[in-house]
Amino acid sequence: MSSHASTVDPKKAELWDTHHHTHDVISTRTLGYFLYLLSDGMLFATLFAAYGVLSYQHSYFGGPTPAEFVKPWYTFAQTIALFLSVLAYGFGMNALKHKNKSGLINGMLAAFVLGVVFLVLDIHDMNHLYSMGITLASSGGMSAFIVLTQVHATHIFFGLIWILVMIAQVMTKGFTEETVGRLLTLRMFWHLQAVIWVFVYIFVYLWGYIS
Amino acid sequence: MLVDLPGGWSPLLGRLAWSQIPYANPILAPLFVAVVIGAIIVLGLITYYGKWTYLWKEWLTTVDHKKLGVMYIIIGLVMLFRGFIDGLMIRTQQVWAVGPHSSGVFGSLHGYLTPFHFGQVYSAHGLIMILLAATPLLVGFMNIIVPIQIGARDMAYPYLNALGLWITAAAAALIMISLFVGDFAHNGWFEYAPIFEMQYSPGVGVDYWIWTLQLVALGTTLGGINILATVIKMRAPGMTWGKLPIFVWASLSANVIALTSFPALQVALGLVAADRYLGAHFFTAGMGGNLMLYTNLFWIWGHPEVYFVILPAFGMMSEIFPTFSEKPLFGYITMVLASMAIAGVSWLVWLHHFFTMGAGPYVNTAFSVATMLVGIPTGVKVFNWAFTMYRGRLTFNAAMLWAIGALFLLLIGGMTGMMLAIPAINYMVHNSVFVVAHFHSMLLVIVYAIFGSVLYWFPKVFGFKLDEFWAKTMFWLFSAGTALVFVPMYMLGFMGMTRRLEYVFNTGWQSYLDVMEFGIVVYTLSVLAFFILLYVSVRDHAKNRVGADAWGTSRSLEWMTHSPVPFYNFAVLPHINERDEVAWRRQHGIDNVRPEHYDDIHMPNNTGVAIILGGLTFVLGFALTWRIWWLCIVSLLAIIVLMIIRSFRGDPGYIVTGAELQRMEEEAYRREAQIADSHHSHPVSGGVVGNAMAYQRNDSSKRL
Ligand code: HEM
Ligand SMILES: [Cu+2]
């Protein structure tokens, strides 16, 4: 193993890259973004762990628990809005395959509007909790509940800004290597947020409701 | 305002007030004056010599991975120096404040530091050494070496690379400014719940700690993504995974750890911030908080982090040993597997940092066994290095000495780590200076590997070798310091001396502390030797110019291109045939074959956006620390807007024409021939310090 036997004939060996293999910009970019999303996934995994530790009965310190205020159907409406948003984005990306600019922009706009619906419902929900006197400061359990759900909402907020930016970029620049690469990475981001929402919905809202 | 702040707060300045500037402190005030005078002199010199445009064009806006790497290393060395001064202060306090009769000055009952100030010093020391010295130094080396070793012209994302650097610089600036504006955390580098809560630590120290760490975490994550993508996507044709240089494997495994573990730190810090800023109850003693949740979250990152810093150091040693043993690395495949195994197991051992939490015999046993498992791959590595040297033709130059020193320290640190991994022993020595001695042995492995690498790769980056005599002097002084400081520390640990004492109650320990103080003085001499080393080497650089293969026995791809490395790394990318391509070509006498013709190449443009974003993250961190809300909002908005603008503009890059490449290459070859037949009898100019004429682009290159 230590003496690595040579298998190439040095006289005939190819020494320089004469074929000019180039690096595919889009795939390099999506790979990097995928790596970033891995770290984003770890971020949520850690938050879920913290939530797990802080969702025992004693974590609520005798104060309000999710069972008292979670409305599963309300949150289900949020779920539907976010999923439809992802679907609309998918239709937009389908239009991209046919180089259909207006189709893409329509899909993105629909995704944006549905995302806004999700976020408005979330903000309304938080306001409702606040009006009942339930905040981060109520107990360790409520801190974990609110931080986990609102970190997710913050991701959605920045995703919405990004969607607007991409609509503007597609309108001004069309489909270049850069914009297409970004549309793909944004799609990965948007899908991941929807997947994480599934976990939030099941483990935080539904679980909290029944326990 | 969301939580009740002790002390004042104003909308304009937040918690900032004149009283926060420690101008009456007998240590900080003179230091502040010295820093201001030093800064004025440096800025004045730059202005006097008219170097601002050079600095801006060649360094501050660069996206060249080598220059960014050099700047990472400069930040790391500066912070290493700062951390060293902290260490000197800690040792001096402990040797002074022994027993009830010891004197006290500067308002301190014993010694010269008050407990609060002493707490800040050791907290800053730990944080700086691990995250702002070791980490940037290693990231710097990975930045410089990885792309060249895999035959690439740059990182996968050059702009992101610059961003990572400037965010790290912002973190360093934030912790430095905490010296003079407000104070730093005083509860240890990893903090404890609930003492970091607002109630018990009402100052801004913990807030500085939060945002400094948060910025480092962000910068390191960005850097990690970049290196992973670079290795996966940018390898030269023919470089299959089995031919990857070992340092690249080490960097790869380290950055897998970084990418997956830093988010845990970011969450832990984010939750501390939620407690302190929003009144949440994650880690409070009452209201349903959980103290040990913090400790768990921190060490879930913390243990992988220690392997994140040691794996690249292992990689460096794996490059130095073969070169100066004139043999290929023994057990390449086992080395790769060992790195990956260490990266994997590093995730399963975090609880060994708090066996005393009392999780019960089953949990403690499981983590104890997992911890000991790390010893297997580590042992494999030690044997591989030993067998690499076995029957090799050894050259004991300074770089090799540092690598061998690292090997010995690894043995000591690893053995004591194994002892600590046994809960029954751990209950005895936990939080004693025995633990401190253990992890210093380990972290010194990194420092030794880094100094070895500085010597080893310096000629590649700058085109001339460092002075051997002073490098060896530094090594021996440093090693003497290591022995004098840490042998007594292990002994004191066994005798029961706990860590972080600002007052040592047992006068029987005085003689040990005296030896350690002497050791730190010897360390100080080695720091001086390092400065002399730099001075002498730069003075004599023309005598020490080197060609592409600086050592004559090197093996991996970085030694194929010129020294100093041109900005395009390789005029024509090499095609890789063997694992140790350079050694293979040399062996078969084809190392002088040049490419037949040169084609146009595409390079990224410089950008000022990265440094501006770095500056803005600094402002954001400062504003968050002092709760200047308007400034938080303004800087955050500025960051977002700038990022959007940058994404609209993009970077088309520019073309270097084949003709121009040929001109630069011929110039470089001409220099190399001169160096080769001068036999050091008459000096050859060039290199970075002389003038890097060879790679001057003239403006005929096409801008896109
Ligand atoms: C052979 C592998 C290793 C083993 C078995 C091991 C074991 C341990 C154990 C059990 C502790 C906890 C001691 C206590 O607080 O009671 C510890 C602490 C520590 N180790 Fe290691 N370790 C190993 C390698 C490393 C490496 C490679 C590094 C860094 C490069 C490192 C850095 C540290 C640090 C920084 C601490 C203490 C942090 C603190 O309390 O401030 N260790 N080690
Ligand atoms: Cu550990």
Image (cartoon, grey):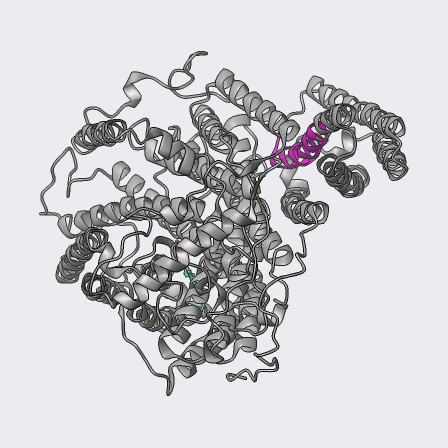
- The spot of residue A37 in percent (x, y) is 68, 45
Q: Which of the pair B121/A66 is nearer the observer?
A: B121
Does residue B200 appear in the picture of this structure? no
Q: Residue at x 67, y 36 (%)?
A: A148
Q: Is residue A101 above or below residue B489?
A: above
Q: Left of B445 or right of it: where is B481?
A: left
Q: Left of B519 or right of it: where is B77?
A: right
The range drawn in magenta is: A136-158
Does residue B41 appear in the picture of this structure? yes
- The spot of residue B586 in percent (x, y) is 45, 75
- The spot of residue A146 in percent (x, y) is 67, 31
Q: Residue furthest top?
A: B11
Q: Is residue B155 above or below residue B557?
A: above
Q: Is residue A142 magenta?
A: yes
- Residue B654 image-quadrant placement: top right
Quarter holding the C terminus of chain B is: top right
Q: Left of B428 or right of it: where is A1?
A: right
Q: Which of the pair B99/B258 is nearer the observer?
A: B258
- The spot of residue B215 in percent (x, y) is 48, 38
